[in-house]
Image (cartoon, helix red, strand yellow):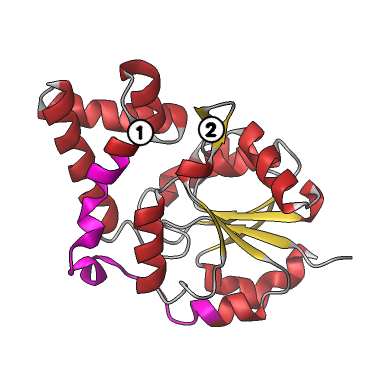
Amino acid sequence: MPSPVWFFDLDNTLHNASHRIFSEMNRSMSDWLIENLSVDQVEADRMRTDYWHRYGTTLLGLIRHHAVEPHAFLNATHAFVSDPVLGELIRAERGLSELFRRLPGRKVLITNAPAIYTTKVLREIGLSRVVRKRYHIEQMRLLGRFRPKPSPSMFRMLLAKERVHPANAILVEDSILNLRGARSVGMRGVYVRGYDQQAKRARASPLYRTMSGLALRVESVTDLIRRQRFLR
């Protein structure tokens, strides 16, 4: 059997974004909504979370319902990554580069985050020279429209670009919705649950219980080293 092609998510998969990054990102997005859509704090927070749950990313809801220019939104809401204290916001385990070296097969990054953010986070966690192939949200467009995770059509597009059969592709991800989207096109899935502060609630949900197609559940991506035999 050929070596698998690994598709790794970024936030709460390769690093603990729940530690501080997500709160900073949420604040930036809500501030942008208040300033540009003339809503108050309560409505901004509601819109941000509602669109994220409905579409997999707040940006997609803003494009569909408010005709927001995507690049202006992404650049403004991720401007904090240029702050020199970015390293203080990030928590990641040691040995990530060793993980990528020891896992057989190609590794591809697939994230709903923009390139400016992804590039700097990878540098902070020591993977900028290791993860060569990357797909950011700017590249997740079909027929001119954004199709980020969990879009099945986007997963099919990436599989075609990478020339990999779905059965030989493994998505490593902290989002059950994204894993379900990948599963619908025949990919296998590894659920990384250790960083999600709402993981216990997710595990009790009907959605989690119906994810029978998951190849593996791990607390951290570093667990893949000792448990990769279960993916053969």
Mark 1 = which residue? 70
Q: Callout 2: few (<14), some (14-19), or many (20+) C-alpha neighbours within 10 Å?
A: many
The boundaries of the magenta stretch are 74-97
Viewer-nearest of discs 2 and 1: 1
Q: Nearer the viewer, residue 27 or 154?
A: 154
Please state the total of marks drawn on the protein image. Answer: 2
> Element type at marker 1?
helix
Q: Is residue 83 magenta?
A: yes
Q: Are marks 2 and 1 in contact (CB under 8 Å)?
A: no
Please tell me which residue is depicted at 21% across the width and 71% down the height of the picture: 88
Mark 2 = which residue? 147
Q: Is residue 210 visible?
A: no
What amino acid type is highlighted by mark number 1? Answer: Pro
Q: Is residue 202 magenta?
A: no
Image coordinates of residue 100 in percent, x first then y, are 59, 75
Q: Is residue 15 visible?
A: yes
Q: Earlier in the sequence, mark 2 or mark 1?
A: 1
What amino acid type is highlighted by mark number 2? Answer: Arg
Please tell me which residue is depicted at 42% across the width and 67% down the height of the picture: 122
Image coordinates of residue 81 in percent, x first then y, are 25, 59
Q: Is residue 12 left or right of residue 80?
A: right
Q: Is residue 90 left or right of residue 189?
A: left
Q: Quadrant of the C terminus?
A: bottom right
Residue 59 lies in quadrant: top left
Image coordinates of residue 185 in percent, x first then y, are 73, 38
